[in-house]
Amino acid sequence: MTTSIFSTETLGACQEICGKSGSNFTPVFSLLPKDQKEAMTVLYSFMRLTDDISDGESSQENRRTNLNNWKKQLSEILNEKIAGFQNSSPVLNGVKQLVDQANVAPEWLYEVIAGVEEDLIFKGYATKAERDSYCFKVASVVGLCCLAIWKGNQTKGRDAAIDTGYAFQRTNILRDLMEDFKRGRCYLPTVTLEEFGVSPMIPTNGTQKKAWNRLIRFEINEIEKLFLSGRTLLPLLPRPGRAVFSGFLGIYHAILVQIAKDPEVVWRKRVRVGSIRKSQIMLKALRIKWIGF
């Protein structure tokens, strides 16, 4: 058995974070070889902790301070300014190993923090380019990290990994419309709202719902193109990574399919993937791991 690149403390902390998360993604990590499974556990934990800083209940000023401190700690450990790393977070100790030994680029990690900071001082997006820039920071760079960890073809697979991140985050935006509106937020660009004649608020009459249905269907068509691009990454991945990526794709696409069947569902509840569909997706991923297709 190969020796882990991560300390026992790091793995323990990250496994605890993943266990408490209730994420649809973390169980799929089990399809990976031990070293890649551990790397994904560390990566997810970093993303989770970074996001939690923004979503905390303290004042915005405190959260910005905490996020800046987190970024400073990341910079210090990546630049080896913390002797022996003994004073840093065990998760950041693991992130250091991701950069040094799993080919995860430091700039991708800083992009994630920048995206979370954008969320913290949220001002909305006037254009599609602004929306896409946000999606790149919080989702597409995660795809690039995964591509590196899974030892995929980073040259040929880069665009597909980026498009997958766009597909996942734009699916999130549709799924979370009602929740975000209640928080006074809208992640859809103003230009799109104006194109379909809607306002960033929950529709209350038939006319408003029809207009929103048209917008949501338009978004779904655009997101489907991104999923199509993302699927071109599958043959560029070794079989274990291909299996996990298939699971990720299946879970997110299942959410989009539910919204496509009934666009108004986003105003009634948060769309989730049912246990039967999750099992089907997992079985397909297992088949890919063992058979290859």
Image: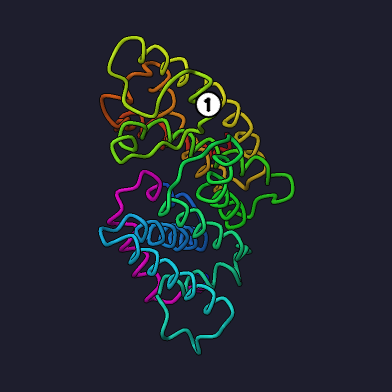
* Residue extent of the magenta highlight: 3-27
Q: Name the residue rendered at 43%, 23% in the picture.
A: 257
Q: Is residue 10 magenta?
A: yes
Q: Residue at the location (52% across, 59% down)?
A: 36
- Tell whether position 38 is magenta: no
Q: Classify mark 1: residues with Cα within 10 Å, few (<14), some (14-19) or many (20+).
A: some
Q: Secondary structure at mark 1?
A: helix
**Count of picture labels:** 1
Residue 265 in the image: x percent, y percent? 31, 21
Q: Is residue 24 above or below residue 189?
A: below
User: What main secondary structure does the magenta stretch of the protein show?
Assistant: helix
Residue at horizontal 25%, vertical 58%?
57
Residue under the image location 48 percent in, 69 percent down: 71
Is 118 situated above or below 59? above
What coloring was used for the rendering? Answer: rainbow
Image: 191 above or below 9? above
What is the x, y in percent for residue 266? 33, 26
- Horizontal side of residue 101 vs 28, given as left or right: right
Quarter of the image where the C terminus is located: top right
